[in-house]
Amino acid sequence: MLPRSTPPRPKEAKLFRNNRSQAVRIPVEFELPGDRVLIHREGGKLIIEPVTRPTNIVELLAEWRKEAPLGPEDRFPAIKDVRARPEKIF
């Protein structure tokens, strides 16, 4: 029988002010990749997740599929097609 792995114990982190924002110093063992995160609340918890970026066209198209369809206000306006006239070039 395999031994059960116990989740790591929570570690205390320091909060500090950075201009008008509150910041948290993240210990190295909890370091996140990249330079951006998503943050949201779940009850009394604050959840911080790394922002992942598509790395190829298939992932990019999959992300675009999640977007809401464009509405009529997003369409190009109708443009009257004007016939070209000859121009004199000196």
Image (cartoon, rainbow, N blue to C red):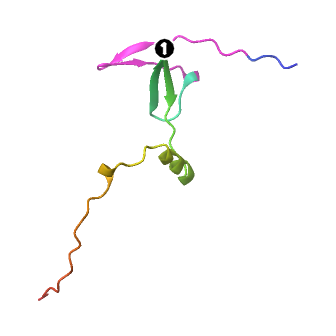
Which residue is at a point 42% across and 47% down the rendered structure image? 69
Looking at the rendered structure, the secondary structure element under dot 1 is loop
Magenta segment: does it hold 9? yes
Which residue is at a point 55% across and 48% down the rendered structure image? 59
Q: Nearer the viewer, residue 85 or 38?
A: 85
x and y percent of residue 74 in the render?
Answer: 32, 51
Within-10-Å neighbours for mark 1: few <14, some 14–19, many 20+: few
88 is higher (above) or lower (below) than 23? below
Image quadrant occupied by the N terminus = top right
x and y percent of residue 83 in the render?
Answer: 21, 79
Magenta segment: does it hold 16? yes
Image quadrant occupied by the C terminus = bottom left
**Left or right side of 33 for 73:** left
* Span shown in magenta: 6-29
**Left or right side of 23 for 80:** left
x and y percent of residue 76 in the render?
Answer: 29, 58
x and y percent of residue 60 in the render?
Answer: 51, 49
Residue furthest right in the image? 1
Q: Nearer the viewer, residue 74 or 4?
A: 74
Q: On the image, numbered disc 1 is attached to which residue?
A: 43
**Left or right side of 88 for 63:** right
Splitting the image into 4 quarters, where does residue 36 fall? top left
20 is higher (above) or lower (below) than 84? above
Circle count: 1
Tell me the amino acid under the disc marked 1.
Answer: Gly
Residue furthest front in the image? 72
Which residue is at a point 52% across and 51% down the rendered structure image? 61
Q: Nearer the viewer, residue 27 or 40?
A: 40
Which residue is at a point 20% across and 81% down the rendered structure image? 84
**Left or right side of 68 for 80:** left
Q: Nearer the viewer, residue 10 or 40?
A: 40
